[in-house]
Amino acid sequence: MRTWRTIARNVVVRLMLAALALSAVVASAAGPAAAADAGPQPEASSAVSSSSLRTGGPGGTTFRPTYRDQLGGQASAETLSNGANDLNSGSSTSVMPYQPYTDWSWADQGYTSTTETLTVDDADLDSHYFWAYDFAVGGTGVGYTGLQTGSYPTNGKIALFAIWGADAAQGTECEAFDGEGVGWTCRIDPFEWTEGRPYVLRIAVDGSNSDGTWYKATIRDVARGTLHTIGRIHHPVAGGRVTGRGSWTEWFGGPSATCEALKRSHVRWGLPTSDDGRVKTTGHTNHTESKDGSNSCSGSTSVADEKDSVSQKVGPK
């Protein structure tokens, strides 16, 4: 049986692979410091402001398609607008990168907030990477928040937030999904993050009643001192808490002809904290996994501890 993390990754992969083949249907300083959960701060003027609660269908509003709509038919990787560029003309073989993962440990299983710092040091401009901090909420829900490049539908940079098992969301760019599992997702699109600049990702409990618990995702640009809300998502478990699970790098583009042709990604993850910095992670494990089940590019990926951070690299050395 597939784990929730595998399901989450597969949803993202299938979404991005198919979306890249579709026409658009709607229209980052500091070093790798450990994540400091600084708590609520004034938000930048460009943050998500006026919210709309969407708990049903389009209902006359402009609505980006659901994940299932975006997936549509299964697209051939060779026909993807960007993935096709990774293949040599006439090549009969293709490869996918290994992917790096860091799993975090905690003394307890539930906090009022969790925070992680992400710095993208290097990423090819024409790549399709998702750098995600995943978490558990309310005992039964799981989700992620992070940054992407080459995202659907603008093929640009975004900030993302999603929870499986959620039943509502608030934000200017939020929608339901029903691919492998159901839930709600919110984003800032575009979010023009800058290489070499640390961004603080934070998920916090933001209200709870008998109907469940609201979780708010923010992203802080450390260099600029700006704070942005990605969105609020509601999970139907009252008195819920949040626990950071892992930090990982996902490739969601098409295959390459050779391992040497893989797109580059180099990021650093700070050591996460919880409860506004009062709780630190008790440890972590690093590992890599094959993207497609093969061992053809096992040397394409590395994950290693650095001072107060973990480095994850994908692509040719």
Image: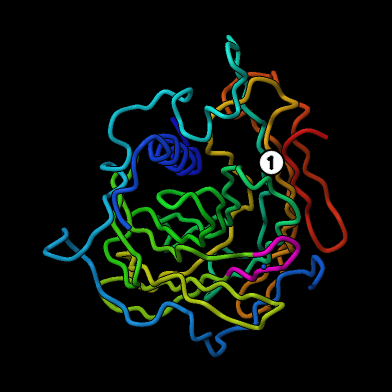
Q: Quadrant of residue 195?
A: bottom right
Q: Seen from this angle, which residue lies furthest front?
A: 89
- Vertical position of residue 184 compared to residue 129: above or below: below
> SS of the residue at dot 1?
strand
In the rendered structure, does residue 200 fall within the stretch colored magenta?
yes
What is the magenta range?
A: 194-201
Query: Looking at this rendering, what residue extends furthest in the right direction?
Result: 307
Q: Residue 155, percent across and down?
A: 48, 49
Name the image quarter holding the N terminus: top left
Place of residue 115 in the rendered image (x, y in percent of width and height, measured from the top left): 62, 70
Q: In which quadrant of the rendered view does residue 134 lie?
A: bottom right
In the shown orientation, is residue 105 left or right of residue 13? right
Tell whether 217 sits left or right of 284.
left
The residue located at (64%, 20%) in the rendering is 257
Q: Which residue is mark 1?
A: 100
Label 1 sits on what residue type?
A: Pro
Q: Residue at x 27, y 49 (%)?
A: 66
Image location of residue 120, percent across then percent down: 70, 57
194 left or right of 180 in image: right
The answer to whether residue 179 is above or below residue 73 is: below
Query: Measured from the top left, where is residue 87 in percent x and y?
Result: 59, 22
163 or 192: which is nearer to us? 192
215 lies above or below 145 = below
The chosen color scheme is rainbow
Residue at the location (32% across, 37% down)? 71
Q: Residue at x 27, y 61 (%)?
A: 167
